[in-house]
Image (tube, rainbow, N blue to C red):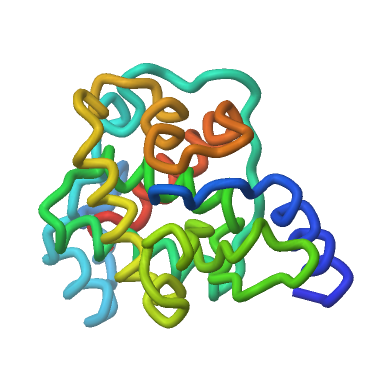
Amino acid sequence: MNSIFRNSVLGIAGVALAGGVFAGPVVGHTDATPVRTSPVAAVQADKPKADKPDTGKLIPHGVQGAQSRIDLDDEQVANTKAIIAATKKNGMDERAAVVSIATALQESKLENLGHLGDRNDHDSQGLFQQRPSSGWGTVDQITDPEYSTTAFLKGLKQVDGWQDMPLTKAAQTVQVSAYPDHYAQWEQQAADLVAQHWNS
């Protein structure tokens, strides 16, 4: 990511971020000509394919409002996978991962942000823009993707009925953002990322 683009993303993030107070067979082949399959392809064909999570489970209430989408670089994909891994480790389901990833997309564009100086929302840092001064943990902790995701999920677990809420309300109840409706715009991309990486 070039520095001009990164600065514009970080500038947007600094303005928009106010969270962190809480927290096989060949089909149609009918002639007698043998079909050659490479050994690698044969092994892959024998592997059971993991089913993608059901869309109805990922987005049970449908998306709200216009949706945003960004292209992800390797760092952002790695952070996505780290959020999913932490969600599984905490015994939570795909919907929790969707809420977590949508929140991180809004708060940091899935970049593990350090202190942004004047563009910072107080002392907010990490994927979820959590604040050390609000009890989320130390800077080292909240800039660790597993720790910060676990902290977010701990807050989410404390929200009665979060599973039945629209995503933006569940996220806002944990984050207490000055922009409570902004999480909604990332729900489709978050769901797509969970569908892509949950069983990978």
Front residue of this view, candidates 196 and 179: 179
Does the image show residue 31? no
The image quadrant that residue 164 belongs to is top left
Q: Is residue 29 left or right of residue 118?
A: left
The percent coordinates of residue 152 (x first, y second) are 33, 53
Q: Nearer the viewer, residue 197 or 138?
A: 138
Give the residue drawn at x 17%, y 75%. 43
Q: x, y percentage for residue 180?
A: 56, 30
Q: Is 171 placed above or below 144 here?
A: above
**The furthest residue to the right:** 4
In the depicted structure, whether residue 64 falls above or below residue 148: above
In the image, 84: left or right of 24?
right
Residue at image location 58% in from the left, 26% down from the top: 181
The answer to whether residue 97 is left or right of residue 181 is left
Residue 163: quadrant of the picture: top left
Q: 127 and 139: which one is in front?
A: 139
Q: Quadrant of the N terminus?
A: bottom right
| Position of residue 21 measured from the top left corner of the image (x, y, whole percent) | 46, 48
Q: Quadrant of the C terminus?
A: bottom left
